[in-house]
Image (cartoon, rainbow, N blue to C red):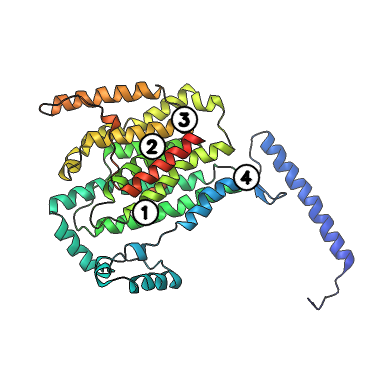
Amino acid sequence: MEFNKIAVNERAVKRNAKIEEAVNRIVRSYDGLKSALRVGGRKANYDDLNFEFRGGPADSIRKKHYDKSLRLLWKSEEHSPFLDFKDASTAEKSLFDMAVRSMTDEEKAARDRLAMPEFKELLNREYTVAQKQAIVNILAAIGHGEAYAWLVSAELLNEVESTGGRTALTMQVLEEAKHFVVLRELLMAFDVPIRRQSAWEYLLLESVFKADGLEKFFGMNVLVEGIALSLFGQMSTLPGLEVLRLFHLDEARHTALPSNYFREFPMTRWQKIRPSAQLRRLKMILPALPLIPLLEEDLAELGYDALDFGGSVLRKVSGLAEQTGFNLPLPRPILLKTLDALFNAYAKATREDHIPRSFMESEATVGDEELEVEREIFAAMNAA
Ligand SMILES: [Fe+2]
Ligand SMILES: [Fe+2]
């Protein structure tokens, strides 16, 4: 390449470089000393010398989360065209149109791009007002959770080490933002009141947001995502709620993030078993327990048993916690036995002719694809 090189003052260039070197030495050693004394120093955990974030590249986390998230990135305009999102690219829209053109008339009718009035008609045809209200009550709980997932993942972004870790969290922030705004519009389309957070959700989500450092991984990616996995897995087969299948896929990936991260940056044994940390984890889980009977009426309206649902959630959450290395004050088999005894006592007190059974063995997820996704997540963890 031919450039018209301009002559510069060599002495000035050298002097400028020397000044910069001197200032650099002062700034770096001053900040180095402050951080050694733990009274400040460089704020960014960025390693400009190696053009990496501290912790190195961690390419395998990047591939498993950032690359995969981009491969599976879905657009609301394509999957819920009745909502007010214009997020699909021209190429994606023409691909969709080509797919529709190659369908038979019957397939076309089934996959027709609904506008909002037709979507509302579909909801009114499929559900009674009481059923619509029950769906919205249940999904509002997770909708408020999405708001917190967005908040928490944005904070975790600055807690994780390595370039790969940051790319993974960056995608989670993007996906939680999408989950919140899309779910919010979806629920508003039901035209029934959307309820506030219950006291139990408030306590649970605030304690997750306030958790120290990487303990947020337990609160968010294990506990809250574990609940979300069961809820989306249960409701994605309902008419009009098919888009929840994509939420489920995203949340499944998020539940795998802590174990992939800790494989590269392991927790110390003390971090896993520290009694105060174990107690705080238990404290985060506790508000989820009264949430189960609180949702009982709404789940029952749709034919779901709240205790089966709760058992499925707690089995998955405690499994994820164990596999990730977040120890709880009780070993998992004893915890699950205790919870089963508690659930059966509640059922005995509130239900006629209750026959004791293991609620912890029940499975809330319904769709075949969703079950397969969960099997993969748990199998991958077991193999690790
Ligand atoms: Fe989410
Ligand atoms: Fe998530």
From the viewer's perspective, is the residue at label 1 or at label 4 nearer? 1
Question: In this rendering, would 224 be left or right of 277?
Answer: left
What number is the disc on residue 45?
Answer: 4
Disc 1 marks which amino acid?
Leu
In the rendered view, does 360 fall on the left or right side of 211? left
Which quadrant: the N terminus? bottom right
| SS at circle 1 | helix
The answer for how far apart the CA atoms under marks 3 and 2 are is 11 Å
**Of circles 2 and 1, which is in front?**
1
- Mark 1 → mark 4, Cα distance in angstroms: 33 Å
- Residue beneath label 2, please? 223
Amino acid under disc 4 = Asn
For marks 4 and 2 on the same chain, the one whose residue lies earlier in the sequence: 4
Distance CA(mark 4)–CA(mark 2): 28 Å
Report the Cα–Cα distance between label 4 and label 3. 25 Å
Q: Report, in whole angstroms, how far the alpha carbon at label 2 lies from the one at label 1.
A: 19 Å
Amino acid carrying mark 3 in the image: Phe
- Dot 2: element: helix
Give the mark nearest the N terminus, 3 or 2: 2
In the current view of this chain or complex, which residue is farthest to the right?
A: 11
Left/right of residue 113 with respect to residue 162 in the rendered view:
left
Q: Quick one: label 2 or label 1, which is nearer the N terminus?
A: 2
The tag on residue 246 is 1
Label 4 Cα neighbours within 10 Å, binned few <14 / some 14-19 / many ≥20: some
Badge 3 marks a residue whose secondary structure is loop
**Residue 23 sits above or below residue 264 on the image:** below
Amino acid type shown at disc 2: Leu
